[in-house]
Amino acid sequence: MSTWERSSRARVVPPARPRKLAKVPFVELADGRLQGVVSSGSDIERVYVSSVAAGTYAFACSTNNNRPCGGARGGFCNHILALVREAVLQYGAERVARYLRVEIVDAEPSEQTIASTMMSARPPQADSAAAASVFSRFLRHLAYLELAPTTLPVPEMQWFPPSRAVA
């Protein structure tokens, strides 16, 4: 672990495995949900905001313009399955299963066992009200990628209190 990671107040968790960002550019375990942004397979300008609630596995999937996903009728669509796959790559199967409260019996947690266990519970379709905040957080992350590299403080990140002076 680098000096920066040890001295940071926010714990940095490295990805379980490297992942490509083209299909699922944003995935997070937050607000009691697995949530993220998934690229459309048919339109390069369209993305879907998908989520699965911990415990109930209630799912939601809609476009960034808040139009419902045509594949999420009565069950998980391909966007949600892609989100689960990328979450397992990013965080590891055990952590995803623990966060979503998926109890896997007689098997090792994996993308397939997590998704099939959640689908077998026949989860309800949830309201897509959280999509706006998830998409907004994704856009904020993109904005940080556009910043020029610097060693000076970034004003937007000043809510992190300094832990020590830099020499």
Image: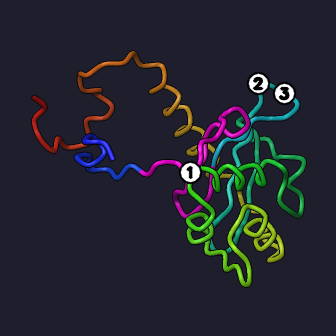
Q: Residue furthest front?
A: 1
Which of the two residues, 84 or 134, is positioned nearer the viewer here? 84
Q: What amino acid does circle 1 point to?
A: Glu
Please provide the residue range marked out in magenta.
13-35
Q: Which image quadrant: the C terminus? A: top left
32 w.r.t. 162: above or below:
below
- Res 112 → quadrant: bottom right
Question: Residue 129: which numbered mark, if any?
Answer: none
Q: Residue at x 84, y 50 (%)?
A: 78
Residue beneath the point at 57% across and 72% down? 98
Residue 119 at x, y percent in the picture? 82, 70
Q: Is residue 34 magenta?
A: yes
Residue where numbered disc 3 is placed: 43
- Its colouring scheme is rainbow
Q: Label 1's element?
A: strand
Instruction: Classify 10 Å Cα crowding around label 2: few (below 14), some (14-19), many (20 and above).
Output: few
Q: Real-space Cα distance between discs 2 and 1?
A: 22 Å
Residue 20 within the magenta-colored segment of the rendering: yes
The number of discs equals 3
- The reply to whether the C-beta atoms of the residues labelled 3 and 1 are less than 8 Å apart is no
State whether residue 83 is above or below residue 148. Answer: below
Residue 154 quadrant: top left
Helix, strand or loop at disc 2? loop
| Residue position marked by numbered label 1 in the rendering | 28
**Location of residue 48 in the rendering, given as x and y in whole percent from the top left corner:** 74, 41
Q: Position of residue 74 (x, y in %)?
A: 89, 63
Q: Which mark is residue 45?
A: 2
The three-letter amino acid code for the residue at tag 3 is Asp
Tag 2–tag 3 contact (CB < 8 Å): yes
**Residue farthest along the bottom direction in this orientation:** 106
